[in-house]
């Protein structure tokens, strides 16, 4: 049984900050990496940031320099620190995890588990 639970969303004004958290609960899987997607109204869900077990990170151009992803492998938690928020950042933010039977099976795989999402609204 796998469960991803996001928290930290809310409503802020442009220029302000928010920090999202996602806790992954699972027993026997290997963690191949986790990340954050977002889906704005009327748009597709897109990957904005990810982090691997080796702490390597990815950021989309739209958030690079403003958002920071981090993780605590001991608690299977990832965070997304979002600074200098813009109205274009308004979206539902989803946590994603790539969990396999073993970490040896990670190569070439992608996210296969998702959270329920948390709303982030940036408005003046």
Image (spheres, grey):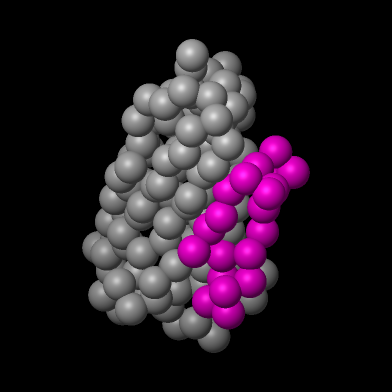
Q: Is residue 90 left or right of residue 66?
A: left
Residue 113 in the image, given as x and y percentages of width and height: 42, 55
Furthest residue toward top: 124
Residue placed at 58% from the left, 36% from the top?
84
Q: Is residue 81 left or right of residue 109?
A: left
Q: Is 54 included in the stretch rendered in magenta?
A: yes
Residue at image location 30% in from the left, 45% down from the top: 7
| Res 117 → quadrant | top left
Q: Nearer the viewer, residue 42 or 124?
A: 124
Vertical placement of residue 85 versus 27, above or below: above
In this picture, is 114 found above or below 24? above
Give the overall secondary structure of the magenta segment: loop
Q: Is residue 118 left or right of residue 94?
A: left
Q: Is residue 88 magenta?
A: no
Q: Is residue 90 left or right of residue 10?
A: right
Tell me the residue at 52%/67% (across/down). 33
Task: From the top left corner, tell me how far across and down residue 86 is, in percent.
Answer: 59, 27
Q: Residue furthest bottom?
A: 104
Looking at the picture, tell me which residue is in the foreground, 91 or 109.
Answer: 91
Q: If the image is split into quadrants, where does the N terminus sit?
A: bottom left
Near-viewer residue (29 or 16): 16
Question: Does residue 5 sit above or below 73 in this rendering?
Answer: above
- The reply to whether residue 9 is visible in this rendering is yes
Q: What is the magenta range?
A: 51-70
Residue 26 picture quarter: bottom left
Please say whether residue 40 is visible from this viewpoint.
Answer: no
Question: In the depicted view, which residue is nearer to us: 67 or 45?
Answer: 67
Expressed as whole percent of the image width and height from the top left, the position of residue 83 reads 54, 42
Residue 10 is situated, as x and y percent measured from the top left of the image, at 35, 30
State whether residue 99 is above or below residue 119: below
Image point 68% across, 49% down: which residue?
65
């Amino acid at each position: 049984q796998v469960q991803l639970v996001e928290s930290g969303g809310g409503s802020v004004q442009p220029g302000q900050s928010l920090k999202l958290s996602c806790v992954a609960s699972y027993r026997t899987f290997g963690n191949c990496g986790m990340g954050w997607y977002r889906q704005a109204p009327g748009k597709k869900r897109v990957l904005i940031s990810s982090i691997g077990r080796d702490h390597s990170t990815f950021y989309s151009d739209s958030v690079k320099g403003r958002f920071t992803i981090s993780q605590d492998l001991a608690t299977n938690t990832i965070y997304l620190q979002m600074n200098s928020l813009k109205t274009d950042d308004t979206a539902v933010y989803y946590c994603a995890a790539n969990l396999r039977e073993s970490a040896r099976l990670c190569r070439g795989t992608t996210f296969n588990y998702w959270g329920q999402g948390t709303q982030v609204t940036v408005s003046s």
